[in-house]
Amino acid sequence: MPKYVLDTNVYIDAFRSPEKAEELKKFLTKHLPLTYLSALVTMELRTGARTKEQAETLEDEVFGPFEKRRRIFVPSAKAFKEAGRVLAALAREHLFDLRAPNNSLIRDSLLAASCREQGLMLVTNDRDYQAIKRHLKAFRFLRPWP
């Protein structure tokens, strides 16, 4: 049975839409024992929490359950190296420009490399992973919901 990681955009969709929140709740009800949280996703989510209430909600409802179960993982040095290799390949294809002011491909490549390394399937709405997968064999992702 696959183990899962939810991308930042899946959580954000759930925060913004009651319908998406219900879908996430159904997924977690069924798959929570097989779901992990990336430290990269915690960083991205925490960056978006601008108020004390938002930060507390993240701590209590998102981070806390994963922390208690020790299911948060961080990218290894090897994952950083693989992400750099993927970004170089995407730059050769003119799909990545390091000089772009807010290039999410950096974080996406690192998340993909670390998910592959951990043997985890990424659940995401982000189409960047199609390009990343061409250069990162055995990386697995799917659109919500399995």
Image (spheres, rainbow, N blue to C red):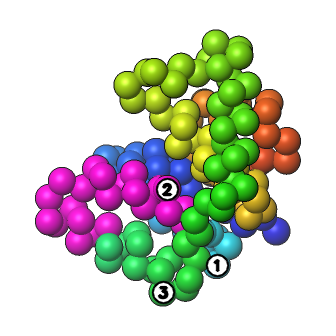
Rendering coords of residue 79 (x, y %): 69, 53
Residue in the image at 40% along x and 57% along y: 43
Compared across the picture, whether 37 is left or right of 57 comes to right
Q: Specify which label sits upstream in the sequence, 3 or 1.
A: 1
Q: Which quadrant: the C terminus?
A: bottom right
- Is residue 115 shown above or below 106? below
Which residue bears the numbered disc 3?
68
The amino acid type of the residue labelled 3 equals Lys
Q: Specify which label sits upstream in the sequence, 1 or 2.
A: 1
Q: Give the range drawn in magenta.
A: 37-58
Residue in the image at 46% along x and 29% along y: 103
Compared across the picture, whether 93 is left or right of 103 comes to right
Q: Are marks 2 and 3 in contact (CB under 8 Å)?
A: no
Residue 46 lies in magenta, yes or no?
yes
The amino acid type of the residue labelled 1 equals Pro
Is residue 49 at all visible to an observer of this figure?
Answer: yes
Q: Specify which label sits upstream in the sequence, 2 or 3.
A: 2
Is residue 22 at all visible to an observer of this figure?
Answer: no
Question: Viewer-nearest of labels 3 and 1?
Answer: 3
Q: Distance between the residues labelled 2 and 3?
A: 18 Å
Q: Which labelled disc corresponds to residue 33?
A: 1
Question: Viewer-nearest of labels 1 and 2?
Answer: 2
Q: Quadrant of residue 92?
A: top right
Rendering coords of residue 72 (x, y %): 55, 72
> In front here: 136 or 18?
136
Mark 1: few/some/many CA within 10 Å (<14, 14-19, 20+)? few
Q: Which quadrant: the N terminus?
A: bottom right
Residue 11 lies in magenta, yes or no?
no
Residue located farthest toward the bottom when viewing the structure as drawn: 68
- Is residue 30 shown above or below 106? below
